[in-house]
Image (cartoon, rainbow, N blue to C red):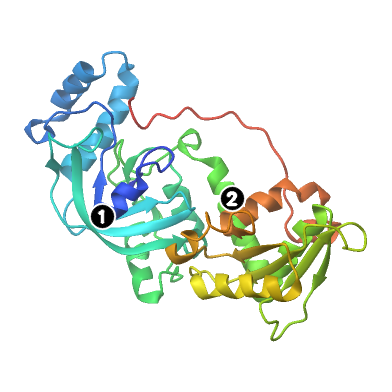
Amino acid sequence: MALWLNRSGRHCEHESKFMDEQRIFLTWGGLNRDLTKIKDRDQLLQTLEEVYPNASPGKRRQNSGQIWAFTTKMSPGDWVAVPSKRKTIHIGEITSDYTFDSNANDPYHHYRAVKWLETDIPRTNFDQDILNSLGAFTTVCQIKRNDAEARVRGMQSHGWRAVGTKPRTATAGDDTDEATDETTVADLDLEQIARDQIARQIYSSFAGHALENIVEAILKAKGFTTHHSDKGPDKGIDILAAPDTLGFGRPRICVQVKSQDSQLDRPALDQLVGTMQHVGADQGLLVCWGGFKKTVLQEAPRLFFSVRLWDQNNLIDEFLNVYDKLDADLQAEIPLKRIWAVTAKEQDETE
């Protein structure tokens, strides 16, 4: 059995298709060819040259490794990891052989059926080395370094958390090719890896009620005066915030913070809206590290002018935006350094 990475597009633009239809797809546009008839990699390269005559030979070779892995190396029973636009990870089990559908809309001609075992697993639940492999820019590759497949399978019986098994050091005899996670620095999404490290640091240093301190610090850096409720029953109030020195300005904001790593359901949103009315707040901010269920997200348009939702990704964005304005003690707990780096060229899919 193997563990595979299969991205749902460069920007997760095909994610809903993957999830709703319980399939993973090769999202190469224009590749309306039945690849079951391809006998070897040389014939596949010839096909790619016909379909993508303007692509460089190097890009066609790189793409052929991923396509060959999807069509011939994946097997029923293998597991697949699909990163989400919500900065989480979906894990599924492949349940079918490669299938070609000539009548499908482009680029959904090539697929394998999957059974989703768990969706929206927080990235902080994975060991950093596995996240590094999942951070490759390639669309399809086998994740095999450091016993990744066995370690991820072991997470299933531990609430989808890392189980602390000791990684096996890769040896010279390990089988590698263009569609494995034997990547160079240029192949990695360094920005995502850095965000994973920041998320892990915040989650470990500010667990539980302490996450409220991060949210309050962000609001203060944005010019709000705050009132932070004491620990204990708060009737849906963690933080009250308003602009101006004494906090008498508008808008008046009521904030509820949940540090759980699971998705928040609708009752928490209803409680916040009710508390806003009780304290005379103009707007509300609901923060949940683990994100929100559909029952909450579907209410976001209706409450657009009164409520904002921050998941882990939003919180980190806001934290980074005001980092230079945070007090020295908080910066010392999460020390960051801004750097400039050359952007890697995306080489995964041929347009």
In the displayed structure image, the side of residue 277 where residue 331 appears, left or right:
right
Where residue 234 sits in the image (x, y, percent)? 70, 82
Task: Say which mark, if any, is on residue 67.
Answer: none
In the picture, the quarter occupied by the C terminus is top left
At 60% from the left and 75% from the top, the residue drawn is 271
Task: Say which mark, if any, is on residue 2.
Answer: 1
Location of mark 2 (residue) = 195
Residue 284, relative to residue 338: is it above or below? below
Amino acid type for the residue under numbered disc 1 = Ala
Dot 1: what SS? Answer: loop
Amino acid type for the residue under numbered disc 2 = Arg
Residue 69, relative to residue 113: is it above or below? above
Where residue 155 sits in the image (x, y, percent)? 38, 69
* Other-residue count near label 2 (Cα within 10 Å), few / some / many at <14 / 14–19 / ≥20: some
At 42% from the left and 69% from the top, the residue drawn is 165
At 46% from the left and 59% from the top, the residue drawn is 298
Front: mark 2 or 1: 2
Dot 2: what SS? Answer: helix
* Nearer to us in this view, 113 or 246: 246
In the picture, the quarter occupied by the N terminus is bottom left
Q: Earlier in the sequence, mark 2 or mark 1?
A: 1
> Residue 206, can we see it?
no
Residue 110, relative to residue 43: is it above or below? below
How far apart marks 2 and 1 lie (CA) works out to 27 Å
